[in-house]
Amino acid sequence: MRFALAESAKLEQGPRFNIAPTDPVLAVRQDDGEREIGRLRWGLVPPGATPKTIGRPLINARAETVDSQPAFKEPFRERRCLIPADGFYEWRVTEDGKYPVWITLPDGGLFSFAGLWSHSMPKEGQELHSCALVTTEPTAQIRAIHDRMPVILPREAEAEWLDPDADPKALQELLRPGPETLEIRVVGKFVNDVRDDGPHLIEERATEPRLF
């Protein structure tokens, strides 16, 4: 099974096509040598904080400073996770407006974002498990769309990212731009409505002028 999960691992929800900050996202974590899969709030909340006290959700952690930023340095050392996906959205800005694009591996297969997670206990007493994506400089291909991109881990690096004994310097080496070649297609603007969800969001749309 992908991610070496226990046979008892089950998902309580089907695929999502439109995930916004503070929504739950699927994540793989490792605890006491065993891997588990579950949902984490997208928007990391450090221990002792609450969503209200941190203000804007901490959805991304910059690879260049992930080992020094107060909110992320402890999760980077001790609480890393994989966030499985088969694509992500970005918005391409052109003279004719903004267009959403759907970005995938060339074969459309599953991959893992490098993620960090946190566990906090707000004053209300309800446990909160949350996460952030690690971002890095874009590849030449993505630079035409955005000045950052999420870290997509090579499959052979997933185990190292989860390893609680991994060398922090070696982990930093994993936080590089890539893959160099991705599939990019223009999709409809339905994704701009966080209430909308479904496979129609990633259907290719004809647009003029061509964006690439």
Image (spheres, grey):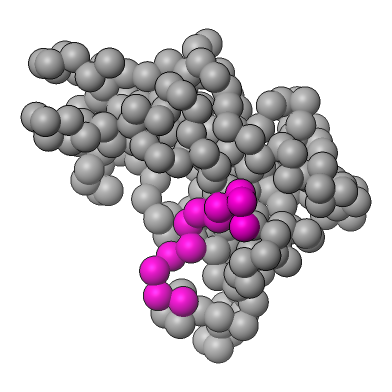
Asked where in the image residue 197 lies, by quadrant, the reply is top left
Specify whether residue 114 is painted magenta. Answer: no
The total of numbered circles placed on residues is 0
Question: Residue drawn 53% across and 33% down?
Answer: 85
Q: Which residues are magenta?
A: 54-65
User: Is residue 194 or residue 47 the one in the foreground?
Assistant: 47
Q: Is residue 88 above or below residue 115?
A: above
Q: Is residue 85 visible?
A: yes
**Percent x, y of residue 97:** 12, 34
Q: Is residue 169 left or right of residue 41?
A: right
Q: Main secondary structure of the magenta part?
A: loop
On screen, residue 200 versus residue 11, left or right, reads left
Specify the farthest residue to the top. Answer: 107
Check the picture and name the quadrant holding the C terminus: top left
Q: Residue at x 12, y 16 (%)?
A: 209
Q: Is residue 96 above or below residue 205?
A: below
Query: Toward the viewer: 66 or 32?
Result: 66
Q: Quadrant of the N terminus?
A: top right
Q: Residue at x 22, y 43 (%)?
A: 192
Considering only vertical position in the picture, is 95 above or below 54? above
Picture residue at 90% right of the left edge, 51% below the top:
165
Q: Is residue 59 magenta?
A: yes
Image coordinates for residue 124, horizontal then vertical, percent:
53, 86
